Structure formats: C-alpha cells, structure tokens
Image: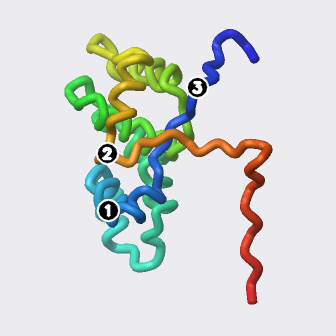
Amino acid sequence: MSPNVESGPRYHIDLDWYNSSNRSFATLAESRLCSDCRDKRAKKKKDKSEEALLAALKECCGKKPDFITPHLPVLETVFRLFLANGNEPMTVTEMGQELRQLRLESFAPGPDVLRRVLSNEDFYGLHAVAELTPEQPAPEPEKEQ
C-alpha cells in the first residue's frame, strides 16, 4: 500500500438506506439537477431509474461551476460530491482533497471533521461501504425461475 492511500472506510450514498428508511433518493437527487436535465427528465417517460439520475448528475450537472459552491453546508457539499462522481466510494482523505479543490479559498474540512460529521449523518444516506471479508462471500446471484 502506498503511503498516500488511506486504509479507513470508503463512503458512498447508500441507496439501500433510502429504501429501508422509507425515503426517496430520487426526490432528493432530482432537486439537485440543473434546469436542462430537469426538463429532459420530465419529458422522458422511459428511464427514470436511480442509475439514469446518477448518470445525468455525473455527466452534466456535476460539471457545472454552480453545482458545488463555497456557500453550501459541508454535508450538502459531500452529498453533491458523490452525485458528481457517480457515487464512487471515497475515503475521508479523498473527500477532503476534492473539497479543497472545489471550494477554492473557503473552508474545506479535514478528515477528522468529515469522519465526525459522517458518523452522525442521517439525512443524506452517506454511509461507509460494507466491505466483504473472507468469511463473508459475495451473495450468489438469483437464478431466474
């Protein structure tokens, strides 16, 4: 392992948490769409999946300069960071590096602050990725009947 790689947990937006908490990821994420993507999504009857929503946020909205601004609260910024990267898991060190680049001159929290705010987070579904251990094999895919 290289010295710059953190071995701590990797976080992501836990889509399963939304389902088990009777919350709607789509509703929360759709409100972060740019006006162009919101209009396109409203016109499309077909693909309103979470994957399509994440793809739009990653490919379009997340690249716009006003998607993540220095004036957003930390947890909102972290949520948008995951929307902009397609919900790829990141460590708190990686999040801090990204936030320092995106928030420019303003405050960007360090790993300890991020770890603390993420440990108490219960609105955005930002949770550590469940890592499989050798004792926990990956679940078998369901067979079609």
Taking 88 as reference, is 57 left or right?
left
The Cα atoms of the two marked residues, 2 and 1, are separated by: 11 Å
Q: Looking at the picture, how far across and down is residue 143, in whole percent?
A: 76, 79
On the image, numbered disc 3 is attached to which residue? 8
Judged from this view, the residue extending furthest toward the bottom is 145
The Cα atoms of the two marked residues, 3 and 2, are separated by: 20 Å
Question: If you read the primary sequence from the N terminus, does the residue marked by circle 2 or circle 1 appear first?
Answer: 1
Question: If you read the primary sequence from the N terminus, does the residue marked by circle 3 or circle 1 appear first?
Answer: 3
The image quadrant of residue 76 is top left
Residue, x 40% and y 15% (percent of image)?
110
Say above or below: 50 vs 137. below
Q: Looking at the picture, how far across and down is residue 1, in whole percent?
A: 75, 17
Residue, x 74% and y 56% (percent of image)?
138
> At label 1, which amino acid type do we have?
Arg
On the image, numbered disc 1 is attached to which residue? 23
> At label 2, which amino acid type do we have?
Asp
Q: Looking at the picture, how far across and down is residue 95, in whole percent?
A: 46, 26
Q: Label for residue 122?
A: 2
Taking 122 as reference, is 71 left or right?
left
Query: As rendered, which of 123 and 62 lies closer to the eye?
Result: 123
Taking 74 as reference, is 47 left or right?
right
The Cα atoms of the two marked residues, 3 and 1, are separated by: 28 Å
Query: As rendered, which of 16 and 96 lies closer to the eye?
Result: 16
Mark 3–mark 1 CB contact (< 8 Å): no
Judged from this view, the residue extending furthest toward the front is 135
